[in-house]
Amino acid sequence: MGSSGQNTWKLEDHPKLPKGKTIALVVLDGWGENKPDQYNCIHVADTPTMDSLKQGAPEKWRLIRAHGTAVGLPTEDDMGNSEVGHNALGAGRIFAQGSDALILFQENCALWRRIKYISECFKNGTLHLIGLLSDGGVHSRLDQLQLLLKGASEHGAKKIRVHILTDERDVLDGSSVGFVETLENDLAKLREKGIDAQIASGGGRMYVTMDRYEHRLMNHKCDSLVLCKLLGEAPHKFRNAVEAVKKLREHPNANDQYFQPFVVVDENGKAVDPIVDGDAVVTFNFRADRMVMLARALEYHDFDKFDRVPFPKIHYAGMLQYDGELKLPSHYLVSPPEIERTSGEYLVHNGVRTFACSETVKFGHVTFFWNGNRSGYFSPDMEEYVEISSDVGVTFNVQPKMKAVEIAEKARDAILSYKFDQVRVNLQKGDMVGHTGDIQATIVACKAADEAVKMILDAIEQVGGIYVVTADHGNAEDMVKRNKSGQPLYDKSGNLQILTSHTCQPVPIAIGGSGLAPGVRFRKDVPDGGLANVAATVMNLHGFVAPSDYEPTLIEVADN
Ligand SMILES: O=C(O)[C@@H](CO)OP(=O)(O)O
Ligand SMILES: [Mn+2]
Ligand SMILES: [Mn+2]
């Protein structure tokens, strides 16, 4: 079963488990398991529902791996993230993920020849590289940018402009300065070789360009870094990028992810290089969700989310193809992992009616990522995806409850409607607020997430259904950087080093509900189970056996 090319969508019936139970599949975003202390916001927050799942039935609660090789990342030091987490949850298998593109680079010396489309602009045009300047490994990697610069310079690029986005969600706040200095050193070495290379512009990732699912651009059209690039305009002008990030950090409450856009100007105050006709542009992020909008702006002639005037004629390539369904962008450096035969597609073929919901900032997680980086429905008759609009114009520590209640209400109504067999949600609070580094707000967010879980579990109880509650990676359970022995770290000025990023912690998974068949329990023989084992588990609970190449199920049915 399961080989592509044949019509193998039909899943075998599970020998013991019935079909037809409504399953609520709840993914808490950024909700890991960690030792209890004051920086574990999940521990500090009042979370009676999640606590009761943990304490209630030991054979129905366990931890699973959500980082490193368990989700296709290169090493065990790589923290989990939503893309690889939801890919694994939905696909039931582990795929080598985007940050492995580095390895592909190293193996593929012919890369620049392969993308002649880009290098043919080197003779008369400028190469622009746009992306997240960070070694967080979630969206991009500094070492990949360095390889790109090396490759481009060796293959004839004479003029290179880098447009940087500063991070802080995957790395410590303030680290932008060091990353910019490193990049400036690399560019200085290229200049010594006669290549005109410099940083041309930048801004914080949350303020410019790395928007996702059309969240911010819909309302802040002019914030677009793309626009700044095209026009060479931005609210801030600096002579170089090191000066820019240092100055921007002086603003009260400044943090790297929210820097306003800046351009680097020459001695006459003129932007060093906007994008013009005949230039080549490469976006060097590998992760899709926050690059799709920019890719569309760079590639589509009829893009209308904001005004790009003027829209230059460029040759554009992405690090990866960001949307396999839309084939966007049409030119790319490294092939994306081909995530096919996802559980969502199988279940639709086997009559499972599905409802998926989250708010804008995480909507694609339970749809696009879940379905193997594919937009749209497999079958509009069998599926309904509902997006609740996220708050705009505020950082998430100001509205820490986000849309918890609204998502839970939609899920509740979908469950009570009896129109769906699977109701899938992402409850994002712990993660989105955790990324702000605001510990008090994250505690509020965790409580709100717990209340939302309760509302969904209550609805499942009413219809005699089953719940599966898990998370995609850690975040809110640890808000400080620690030394090897687990002690919180302080910076040179004695300030606690706040951890805004995800973690490498395992995440919980709980199953239950009055519809769960007697004897269902977690197996003991998959101790290393991870997110990719969840798909087969859920297929079982729908009454099916998973395809043989899926990671093994986490459950068994004990004879009573
Ligand atoms: O916000 C994001 O883009 C990432 C962190 O970089 O978080 P998540 O993987 O949870 O979406
Ligand atoms: Mn996430
Ligand atoms: Mn996150």
Image: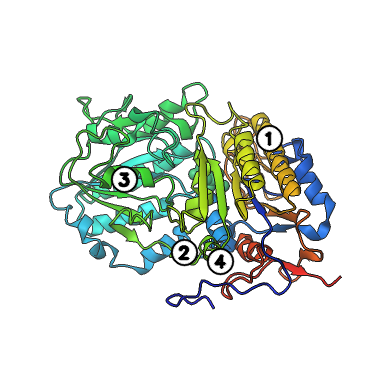
**What residue lies at 64% left-to-right and 40% top-to-bottom?**
408
Q: In which quarter of the image is ligand 3?
A: top right
- Work out whether 283 lies above or below 451: below
* Residue at mark 3: 296
* Residue at mark 2: 339
**Callout 4 secondary element:** loop
**Callout 1 secondary element:** helix
Label 3 and label 4: CA atoms lie apart by 34 Å
Would you say the residues marked 3 and 2 are in contact, meaning their CB atoms lie under 8 Å apart?
no
The image quadrant that residue 399 belongs to is: top right
* Residue 227 coordinates in the image, percent (x, y): 28, 33
3 or 4: tag closer to the N-terminus: 3
* Residue at mark 4: 350
Q: How many marks?
A: 4
* Residue at mark 1: 448
1 or 4: tag closer to the N-terminus: 4
- Work out whether 302 lies above or below 524: above
* Residue 119 coordinates in the image, percent (x, y): 20, 57
- Work out whether 14 lies above or below 172: below
Q: Nearer the viewer, mark 3 or mark 4?
A: 4
Label 1 and label 2: CA atoms lie apart by 33 Å
